[in-house]
Amino acid sequence: MKINGLMLLVLVPFLASCSTQLKSADYRRRAESCEAEKTVLQVSRDAELARLKKNRQIIEASLRAEINSGHARVSELKGRLSVNLVEKILFNSGEAELLPQARDVMDRVGAFLNTIADKDIRIEGHTDSVPIGEKLKYKYPSNWGLSAARATEIARYLQDVAKVEPTRLSAVGYGKFRPIADNDTVEGRGTNRRIEIQLISPE
């Protein structure tokens, strides 16, 4: 019994040392694994940012004339690309029928969207805060209805004419409730009357 006790006393520091070494090796492996994962994520993130930048340059080049005239704007937020088109190049006031001259713009936008097959497309209709006139209330009782009708018209054109895959498309109307400018000025109201086309990750 004494011998066994002595052997145990001798082995305890050795076993403790082995345990510590095993834990250290395990921690090292975990740390190396985490670093590898971080590297992969960073490479993927950098690639996505580079792709986003390239796509923005492509659509900006395609809409250069509209951007220079202040009728279009391309922006990105949190990795999401958005194309903003003002009402006056798409629709007559109070109407949701696409203007003939707007078709060229939408053809270019549609061609661009068809090159980005891994993103869904959300079309948002927005208006200013001026109520619908009495002569048009029979068609659109409120700005909400008008904005939804316009967004749907853009979605229909992208599907039927530009041949964008319909399962990627969604249309929503926000009416006057998401302004990006001051509705108390003529310029602000003109900015708020818009269509926004956003590229979003599939749900």
Image (tube, rainbow, N blue to C red):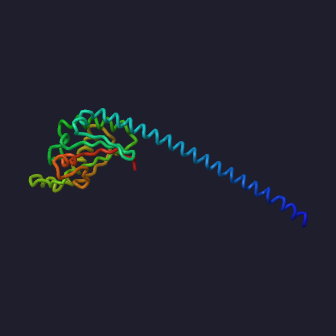
Judged from this view, the residue extending furthest toward the left is 135
Residue 76 vertical placement versus 14 (above, below): above
Whole-percent x, y for residue 28 in the image: 65, 49
Judge from the rendering whether residue 2 lies leftward or rightward of residue 52; answer left or right: right
Whole-percent x, y for residue 158 in the image: 28, 40
| Quadrant (top left, top right, bottom left, bottom right) of the N terminus | bottom right
Q: Quadrant of residue 195?
A: top left
Whole-percent x, y for residue 59 in the image: 32, 36
* Marker count (numbered): 0
Whole-percent x, y for residue 103 in the image: 22, 36
Judged from this view, the residue extending furthest toward the bottom is 1
Q: Quadrant of residue 69?
A: top left
Of residues 8 and 48, the one nearer the viewer is 8
Of residues 113 and 76, the one nearer the viewer is 76
* Residue at position x 17%, y 37% in the image: 100
Judge from the rendering whether residue 199 lies leftward or rightward of residue 42; answer left or right: left
Residue 7 vertical placement versus 94 (above, below): below
Of residues 14 and 195, the one nearer the viewer is 14
* Residue at position x 44%, y 40% in the image: 48
